[in-house]
Structure formats: C-alpha cells, structure tokens
Amino acid sequence: MRTPQTTTTLDEQPISVRVKLAAAWTSLMFLYAYVDILNFFTPGVVDDILAGKVFEFDLSQTFSTAALTLMAVPILMVVLSTTLPAPTARITNLVVAALYVPVTAFNLLGESWLYFYGLGVGLELILLAFIARYAWTWPRTAPSVAGLARESVRAPQQL
C-alpha cells in the first residue's frame, strides 16, 4: 500500500536589499582573495615576488598600502551596505560598484592565463552588476495616506 505524499513548497522568506548587497560584496571579496591565492601557483609569480615585483610594480610599503586601501573599500562596503541610511547606502553602492568595474577589469592586463583570470574577472563583474542592480532598484515605500493628505494641504500654499 502506498502512502500519499504531500508536496509542500518551501517558504520563500523575503531578503532585504541590504542583505543582498552585503552578500554580494562578501562574495566579491572571496573571489578577489581566492584569485590572488591561486595566482601564487602560476609559474614565475612567487619568483617575481621574491625578487620584489608584483605585475609591473615594485613591492614596497607604498604598493602594499595602496593594495590594502583598494581592497578595504569593498570590505567596508559589507558594513556600510547594512548600516548607512538607505538613500546614502544606495548612492554609495552605485558609485563604488561603478568605480570598481575598471579596477576589476585592470586585473586582465598583461596576464597570460586568460581563462583563469577571465573567469575570475568575469565573475567579479557579474557581482558588481548585481550590486548596481540591487542598489538601482532599491525598493521604495509607498507614501502614507496621512503624508499624502498633508502634502495636498500644503500644495495650494506653495502656488
């Protein structure tokens, strides 16, 4: 005898735009870090680092500070996306995501492992596009009836 099985659907909990943005920035940082870590296995990279070079740049305190600053911004965006007031968070996410598109694309310059870096940069650009989309389409709240009534009373006075 067969027992009838009930099919239930999973409960879809709404996810706030702030959580989506924080998750996307976190994912982006994991990709940045993982691509950098895997880069150590590219032939010649460790030798170049030991010789004091990264890409075309000399290893120095200035280089390391610049690299840290460049990566600190997306790292901080995780917190800023969840704590700034909504209008400020929206604009900040749009601006930073737009600024990081060329920063991300720069990582392809001069690389011989185009499949590896192409995949990494492509995934990072997709995440930046999601960030921009989430911020651009940030939900608006409908004006309240009381707020509309106050505005309609004020409107004739402004004429």
Image (tube, grey):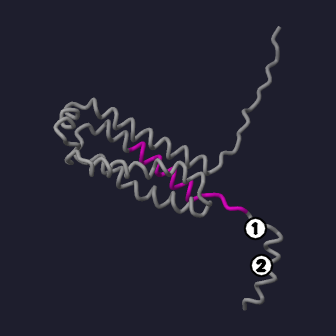
User: Residue 106, image x and y in percent?
Assistant: 30, 51
| Residue under pointer 2 | 151
Q: Nearer the viewer, residue 28 or 49?
A: 49
Q: Is residue 138 left or right of residue 150?
A: left
Indicate yes or no whether the magenta region holds residue 85.
Answer: no
Q: Is residue 154 left or right of residue 61?
A: right
Q: Which residue appears at 25% of the width and 32% of the height?
A: 42
Rate crowding at label 2 as few (under 14), some (14 to 19) or many (20 or more) other CA atoms within 10 Å: few
| Residue under pointer 1 | 143
> Disc 2 versus disc 1: distance between alpha carbons?
10 Å
Question: Which comes sooner in the sequence, label 2 or label 1?
Answer: 1
Indicate yes or no whether the magenta region holds residue 133.
Answer: yes
Q: Is residue 131 depicted above or below 10 in this figure?
A: below
Q: Which residue appears at 44% of the width and 52% of the height?
A: 73
Q: Which residue appears at 50% of the width and 46% of the height?
A: 25
Q: Which residues are magenta?
A: 122-141
